[in-house]
Image (cartoon, rainbow, N blue to C red):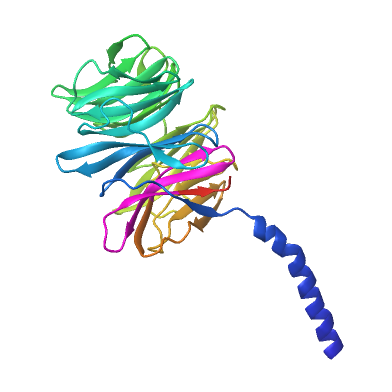
Amino acid sequence: MNGLRAVLVGLVIACASVVSPAAAVTPGWSALPVPAAAPPVTVSDLAARGPGEAWATGYEQAADGLRPMLYRWDGTAWSRDTAFPGAGEVGWLGKVQFVGEEVWIFHNRAGAGEILRRSAGGWSAVPLPQTLWSYQDFTAVPGAAWVVGEDDTGLKVLHYDGSGWTTQSTPDGVLFLMGITARTATDAWAWADTSTGTTVLRWDGKAWRDANVPLPPNSNVHTILLEPSGRVTIGGSQYTDGVARTYLMTWNGHGTWRTTHPPLGDTYTEAMVRGPDGALWLPVRSDRAFQSKYARVDGSRTTFSHGPEHTNAIDVKPRALARAGSALLSFGTVEIYGSKPNLMSERLGG
């Protein structure tokens, strides 16, 4: 018996020596320091162009109102950028996009809308042709940009072609555009509130039309993820007997849409991205006050991971994700006991 026990112990030790090194090099989430802002802060968006450049936008609270907040990742550290026009004025920053070699950011500057553009020569601004009551969303690609919102006459879709602005019309029955995204200047998508419910629209370079997406009954749309391959992923919530659950719809550019209901509860999917591993990643509500939580959806399999521990944290909220080369970047807020929410960033891999 003692001899058999010795053999079994030896096998366990041998197996551990094989498995442990592989487990040790498995990448996990790590914390990235972020210079503090004036809390409470709100994170709007995050975009990355490879491992050495990312931008995060939002706003902080000042005595006289909101102040725009912009941070840059250089591959090593986060730093705050205050060189853009209107950095010290009342306002906020929204979505950030890479357009060719430039960075484009929507800026609400004391109520007036503009697009900030950063090139090798520095910052410049493209003002909107009119001031809107509300600015709902923004997207930009080479050769085109859109800003959607409302004024006293109702819905407005403002289109920029690189030299000037025009106002675009939408199909009858569209009441409000909740979001917009684009793959090219002639392929843009929007999700809209209509007189018959939520509808997905598509711009083909000439007009906005109903994309005829068979959304689940009693559902809404949080986001549309467009990929260069032609693949489209829609994330939203479906309501059954007053209870919401997350759904995902995928389309490969032809054929039919495929709808799934991964075990995500009622997760809001706005921050969903395609990770470097080919899976979908998104932040979810954490079951631990001192750690963030992320979901990885790969086909029919959904797995979860936690971020690093934040000492004395009572709420950790990743707000935006972005693929940065072989890594995933996360940007959001952390509330430490006794203080208001401030900034945090985390990275998986890299």
The answer to whether 332 is drawn above or below residue 149 in the figure is below
Quarter location, residue 287:
bottom left
Q: Is residue 91 magenta?
A: no
Identify which residue, 216 or 317, lies in the foreground.
317
Q: Quadrant of the N terminus?
A: bottom right
* Residue 264 image offset from top left, x and y in percent: 44, 53
Looking at the image, which residue is at 44% across and 42% down? 78
The answer to whether 185 is drawn above or below residue 148 in the figure is above
Q: Quadrant of the C terminus?
A: top right
The answer to whether residue 338 is visible is: yes
* Residue 186 image offset from top left, x and y in percent: 44, 16
Quarter location, residue 211:
top left
Looking at the image, which residue is at 18% across and 21% down? 131
Looking at the image, which residue is at 32% across and 51% down? 342
The answer to whether residue 199 is visible is: no
Drawn side of residue 88 relative to residue 8, left or right: left
Drawn side of residue 5 relative to residue 32, left or right: right
Extent of the magenta region: 318-345
Looking at the image, which residue is at 55% across and 31% down? 252
The outermost residue toward the bottom is 1
